[in-house]
Image (cartoon, rainbow, N blue to C red):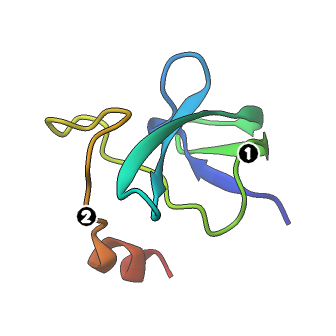
Amino acid sequence: NVLRIPTAAIQEGSKVLVFNAESGTLDERPIKTGLSNWEYTEVLDGLSAGDRIVTSLDKEGVKAGAKVTPDDKAQAKAK
């Protein structure tokens, strides 16, 4: 059992954008990665199961500090 995320969600410098439910914003968080391929990357440190990360980095306005509303439909598809 390992924690893995889509490889496309990882930004340069091994960072991801994580939804901060308290502030309603995106926080940039460094992660330590393990094994990876073009589809998934193992996360060794920096994230926990259940953390909500941004997987659509190409959308306009997606950056650290941005106010966001999570897409709960996308989360339901992932389950």
Instruction: Reply above or below: 26 against 13.
Output: below
Q: Tell me which numbered mark, 1 or 2, is placed earlier along the sequence.
A: 1
Instruction: Reply above or below: 18 against 70.
Output: above
Position of residue 64 measured from the top left corner of the image (x, y, whole percent): 38, 33
Three-letter residue code for mark 2: Thr
Q: Nearer the viewer, residue 79 or 17?
A: 17
Query: Which residue: 76% across, 32% down?
Result: 32
Q: Does residue 23 appear left or right of residue 33 in this picture?
A: left
Query: Which residue: 46% across, 74% down?
Result: 78
Q: Nearer the viewer, mark 1 or mark 2?
A: 2
Q: Nearer the viewer, residue 30 or 75?
A: 30
Q: Does residue 55 appear left or right of residue 38 in this picture?
A: left
Q: Mark on residue 69?
A: 2
Position of residue 2 measured from the top left corner of the image (x, y, whole percent): 81, 59
Q: Residues within 10 Å of mark 2 (few under 14, many from 20)?
A: few
Q: Mark on residue 33?
A: none
Three-letter residue code for mark 1: Glu
Query: Circle 1 — which element?
Result: strand
Q: Nearer the viewer, residue 43 or 52?
A: 52
Q: Residues within 10 Å of mark 1 (few under 14, many from 20)?
A: some
Position of residue 50 measured from the top left corner of the image (x, y, whole percent): 62, 69
Q: Which residue is mark 1?
A: 42
The quarter of the picture where the N terminus appears is bottom right
Position of residue 27 measured from the top left corner of the image (x, y, whole percent): 47, 41
Query: Which image quadrant is residue 21 in?
Result: bottom left
Instruction: Reply above or below: 53 against 32.
Output: below
